[in-house]
Image (cartoon, rainbow, N blue to C red):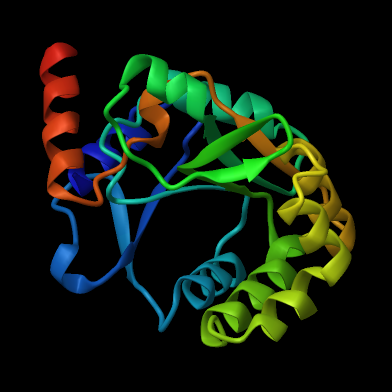
Amino acid sequence: MLTRVVRTLLGHPRVDRVVVLGDRQIEPAVTGASFEEAGGSIAETLSSALERHDGPFLLTTADNPLLDAATIDAFLAGAEGADLAAGLVERRVLLSAYPGSRRTWLRFRGGAYSGANLFWLAGPQVLPVLDVWRRVEQQRKRSRAVLGAFGPLLLAAIALRLLSVEQAAARVGRRFGIVARAVVLPYAEACIDVDKPADHALVEKILRRRGF
């Protein structure tokens, strides 16, 4: 899976270089990509990478083997001008194409969304957000950590579905003094990653249909 993702990124005209952040045991044997050992948490690893390398960064995950050029193009177009962006797929888009697929859904006014494992980090201006992410990771069982990061009013508005996903992202950005954006993608496959054997079987079926 990792090798497929790396090759997709290397083949995209807007990707200048590929850096794999992870455990040495999964270092891909792909010419053109460099490898760096990950830190103690995702947030720490990304913060360290932002401090070492010039941005911007397109971030994805190793279990995203359906990533393709069209999805990258759509995401980059939606992230244009943002400091921080996240890719999402609306539930109706996925279920209309793959009615048996099961995902974790984030509910907002106007729809439910699943993450597409695509993120845009424009540069060091997003480090305060990553610092909050790190603290939430460390204190994920303490609700005060989340409340302190985003504030009770914003969390209540999201929980009550008073905000669309785009509005929620914009408000999070304003809280940190950056432009944050939710990029809703039109491709059902964009949110199909491999978390369980059923996902693996579905991905293999889709890839065979694509001729791989």
Q: Is residue 44 or residue 167 the one in the foreground?
A: 167
Q: Position of residue 153 (x, y in %)?
A: 88, 64
Q: Quadrant of the N terminus?
A: top left
Q: Is residue 157 above or below residue 212?
A: below
Q: Is residue 182 or residue 91 the one in the foreground?
A: 91
Q: Position of residue 198 (x, y in %)?
A: 15, 41
Q: Quadrant of residue 150?
A: bottom right
Q: Quadrant of the C terminus?
A: top left
Q: Position of residue 41 (x, y in %)?
A: 44, 78
Q: Residue drawn 75% across and 45% down?
A: 161
Residue 175 shown left or right of residue 52 in the figure: right
Residue 205 shown left or right of residue 59 in the figure: left
Extreme residue toward the front, this view: 160
Q: Position of residue 36 (x, y in %)?
A: 34, 69
Q: Is residue 13 visible?
A: no
Q: Is residue 102 above or below residue 90?
A: below
Residue 196 shown left or right of residue 99 in the figure: left
Q: Residue drawn 61% across and 71% down?
A: 51
Q: Quadrant of residue 40?
A: bottom left
Q: Quadrant of residue 167?
A: top right
